[in-house]
Amino acid sequence: MSAWLSTANKVAGSARGQATAAAKRQVTSAQNDLARQITDFWSGKPAAPARKKKRS
């Protein structure tokens, strides 16, 4: 029983660590994107032109 619980605890800890790392990566990515958008806005960089729809 103890070995089974120990293994289950390792798996849960690993999953928690991976989820935490993924959340941190997502937050960092969102912060970097927001900082880039703010910098582009205040520096006067023109926005990307709207894409034209293709005629089919």
Image (cartoon, helix red, strand yellow):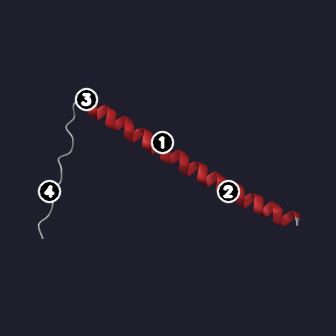
Residue at (71, 61) in percent of width and height: 11
Disc 3/disc 4 C-alpha distance (Å): 26 Å
Are the two marked residues, 4 and 1, in contact with CB atoms closer than 8 angstroms? no
Q: In terms of sequence position, does the residue under pointer 3 or pointer 4 come before the other?
A: 3
From the image, tell me which residue sits under label 2. Answer: 14
Q: In terms of sequence position, does the residue under pointer 4 or pointer 1 come before the other?
A: 1
Element at label 1: helix
39 lies above or below 21: above
Residue 52 numbered tag: 4
Disc 2/disc 4 C-alpha distance (Å): 47 Å
Disc 1 marks a residue whose amino acid type is Thr
Other residues around mark 1 within 10 Å, as few (<14) / some (14–19) / many (≥20): few
Q: In terms of sequence position, does the residue under pointer 2 or pointer 3 come before the other?
A: 2
Other residues around mark 4 within 10 Å, as few (<14) / some (14–19) / many (≥20): few
Disc 1/disc 3 C-alpha distance (Å): 22 Å
In the rendering, at what x and y percent does residue 2 appear? 88, 63
Disc 2 marks a residue whose amino acid type is Ser
Disc 2/disc 3 C-alpha distance (Å): 43 Å
Question: Is 17 on the left-hand or right-hand side of 35?
Answer: right
Element at label 4: loop
Quadrant in which the N terminus is drawn: bottom right
Residue at (21, 41) in percent of width and height: 47
Residue 43 numbered tag: 3
Other residues around mark 3 within 10 Å, as few (<14) / some (14–19) / many (≥20): few
Q: In front of the other: label 2 or label 4?
A: 4
Other residues around mark 2 within 10 Å, as few (<14) / some (14–19) / many (≥20): few
In the rendering, at what x and y percent does residue 9 appear? 77, 58
Disc 3 marks a residue whose amino acid type is Ser
From the image, tell me which residue sits under label 1. Answer: 28
